[in-house]
Every structure is written in C-alpha cells, then in structure tokens.
Amino acid sequence: LAKTTQPISMDSYEGQEVNITCSHNNIATNDYITWYQQFPSQGPRFIIQGYKTKVTNEVASLFIPADRKSSTLSLPRVSLSDTAVYYCLVGDGGSQGNLIFGKGTKLSVKP
Amino acid sequence: NAGVTQTPKFQVLKTGQSMTLQCAQDMNHEYMSWYRQDPGMGLRLIHYSVGAGITDQGEVPNGYNVSRSTTEDFPLRLLSAAPSQTSVYFCASSYPTSGRYNEQFFGPGTRLTVL
C-alpha cells in the first residue's frame, strides 16, 4: 500500500481558496486517490476521488499530475465550517478493506 | 437506510474487563472495517472483513477479536481491556467495485475509556 505524506496543519481565512497537497511517490498503477474530511467527534466523510488529471464535484476539486506521485485537494472559498482534518488515501478496489489513514492535515479557517 | 450504526456511544471499563462493540450496516456492503483513533492522531486499522466469514488483521490487531457471521454485522471484541485501549472506535463499510475503490461510510464512533 502506498504511503502518503501531507502537511500536519494549514491556516486560512474565510473566502480564500485552500490547496492541500499530498505526496504518494509509491502509488501503484491500480491505485486511486481519495480524500476524506473529519470533523471533531465524527467519523470521516468521503469528499472526492480521482485517478488522473482533474476531478470536480460540488465540494472540491482534485488535481493529479501525469506522474500521479502527488495530488492536490482544492477547496474553493472556504468557510468556518470547513475547519476539519483532511486525509489523503491511496489504494485500489482490492485494498479498500485495508486502507491506511495518516495523521491528516488539520485545516483551521479563521474569520 | 440507517447507514452504519455503532453501539454503545460511550463506555467505561475497568482494566481486565471484556466487552463487545457492535457495528451494523444496512447497505449490503461486503467490506467492513474497525479503526481506532487516539487524541490528535489519525485512524489506525484494527481488523477488516471482505465478506461474511472472512476477516483479517490491520495495523493494530493485538487485544481485539472480530467475527463476521452475517453481511450486516461486524462486532469488535476486547478480550481483556487495558488503559492503552482508551480511544474512539469507528466502524466503516463499503461496497467493492472491481478496480475502482469505493468510498467508505463511517459510523458515529464509540468513545471507550479503560480505567
């Protein structure tokens, strides 16, 4: 399973765009990149998933370069309610029962 | 659908006691997992199951047992509780799709304190 590395914490202000980058140098051909969000005292919640290039949904965008050794989660115009821990995971359909969460990135959004 | 449910929400045990944390899902998901989360840490995988009758160990399996007799239920047993097992426990489930990884749905968690 590919190991991921992401910043421990980030600070932002309301209305700004936030980009959180995750490194996964050993990503395998079959691996997908998935991001989760976790609020205090809650279980993680799926945000977005991608394999290559760019994926966008109503919450975020995920940018994946051609070599797939990193990925960037982009949160447009953050609000106070986006304050949470964000986890980057790498794995495939055969490993989804055995995924490794890291410590994640704690995003603090200030007014 | 209720999604993933966990009981109890809170539990206090004394060292050496045993107990079972319950997890159930009504989404017909084949994959189910148990994680623990210590303060300020990420989630660590304890055990997981890829289907009824099949279980395997994760990162931190010592001191825990699991079984999967039905698709819906995946209980986690603490054999002899220790203070080091004080943590928040999350259960998760997902439906496998060939090739593509599918999102995991997490329960609300069980906050366990071992004195």
Image (cartoon, coloured by chain):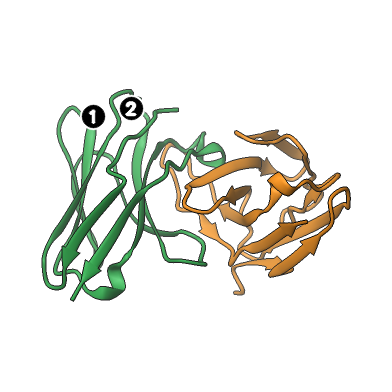
Chain colours: A green, B orange
Q: Which residue is mark 2?
A: A27
Q: Which mark is residue B74?
A: none
Q: x%, y% of residue A19?
A: 17, 52
Q: Which of these two is toward me, A99 or A109?
A: A109
The kind of residue tagged 2 is: Ile
B31 shown above or below A2: below
A103 shown above or below A12: above
A20 shown above or below A16: above
Residue visible at 65% across and 63% down? Answer: B111
Q: What chain is tagged by disc 1?
A: A
Residue visible at 27% across and 43% down? Answer: A7
The C terminus of chain B, quarter of image = bottom right
Q: x%, y% of residue A100?
A: 48, 38
Q: x%, y% of residue B67?
A: 80, 45
Q: Residues within 10 Å of mark 2 (few under 14, many from 20)?
A: many
Q: Which mark is residue A69?
A: 1
Disc 2/disc 1 C-alpha distance (Å): 6 Å
Q: Which of these two is toward me, A77 or A95?
A: A77
The kind of residue tagged 1 is: Lys
Q: Which of these two is toward me, B20 or B101?
A: B20
- The answer to whether A48 appears left or right of A77 in the picture is right
Residue B60 visible in the current orientation = yes
The mark nearer the N terminus, 2 or 1, is 2
Residue B32 visible in the current orientation = no
Residue visible at 61% across and 74% down? Answer: B2
The N terminus of chain B, quarter of image = bottom right
Residue visible at 21% across and 59% down? Answer: A11
Which type of secondary structure does the marked residue at label 2 adopt?
Answer: loop
Quarter of the view holding residue A88: top left
* Residue contact at pointers 2 and 1, CB within 8 angstroms: yes
Kindly give the residue lying farthest to the front in the view shown.
B115
Kindly give the residue lying farthest to the left in the view shown.
A16
